[in-house]
Image (cartoon, rainbow, N blue to C red):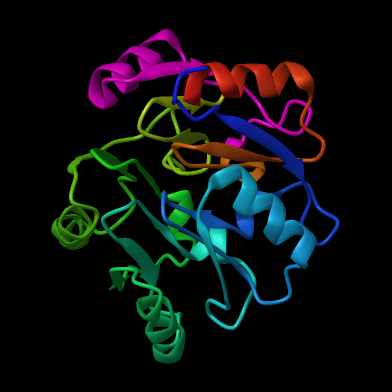
Amino acid sequence: MSGKHRFEVAPMSMYGSSTIGVYIFTNNSVTVIPMDTPEKVINTIRDTLGTEVVRVTLAKSPLIGVFMVGNDNGVLVPSIVTEDEIKELRRFGLNVAVIRTRYTAIANLILTNNKKTVVSPIIEREYVDLIRDVLGTEVIVDEICGTYLVGSIAVANSKGVLLSPDAKEDDVRKVREFFNATVDVGTVNRGRSFIRGGLVINDRGGLVGSDTTGFEIVRIMQVFG
């Protein structure tokens, strides 16, 4: 056996739902989850993603994966997140910045890994420099798959990017060239194309919604593992 960590994918649900991506944020060191997440789920997260696990609220809600986006360098949250919540995140070593865009579901509008970031064209231009500085990446402002929801229809780690099946060949090529990574199309939760809703990924492993099929998991492992 080589020393390489085996990339694992674990199916799970949150609040009885397979759209786990709206409740969870992860990078390679910390996974952020809602306050009332059960211990059993926390153990699965720890074992699969290999991170510290932190319980918080954001904007007094459990929608962590909607209101938080980032990588190992930093994370962004919208202005509806409270000062106390930001303090709590910083206490766990996260470099947090508030982006005062009029949009709150910012995780749907930014696709990032540790080197590259795609920012939705609907985010006000004055925030692009802040995004670049906090995430510490090269940034482009663009649509993917004909939509401004660049964070909803794609998920990235250091090795790959999975795109919605709506991606045309041009989309795949553009993303592959920009991220310089493996790029493929796939779905989660039996054919859902809003991939991030059912997939939480870092460089060590992935959590998928409990409806995700074996075929979908194989594709996820090929792209990210």
Horizontal and vertical percent position of residue 82: 44, 87
Q: Seen in the image, is 91 located left or right of residue 62?
A: left
Between 81 and 149, the one lying in front of the other is 81
Residue at (15, 58) in percent of width and height: 133
Residue at (50, 54) in percent of width and height: 51
Horizontal and vertical percent position of residue 122: 34, 51
Name the quadrant containing residue 98. Answer: bottom left
Tag count in the figure? Answer: 0
For the question of whether residue 41 can be seen, the reply is: yes
Q: Is residue 184 magenta?
A: yes
Horizontal and vertical percent position of residue 190: 79, 27
**Extreme top residue here?**
169
**Highlighted magenta segment, given as a residue range:** 166-195
Between 194 and 116, the one lying in front of the other is 116
For the question of whether residue 165 can be seen, the reply is: no
Residue 35, compared with residue 187, is above or below; it is: below
Residue at (38, 26) in percent of width and height: 159
Horizontal and vertical percent position of residue 107: 46, 54
Residue 162, compared with residue 43, is above or below; it is: above
Q: Is residue 172 magenta?
A: yes
Q: Seen in the image, is 195 located left or right of residue 150?
A: right
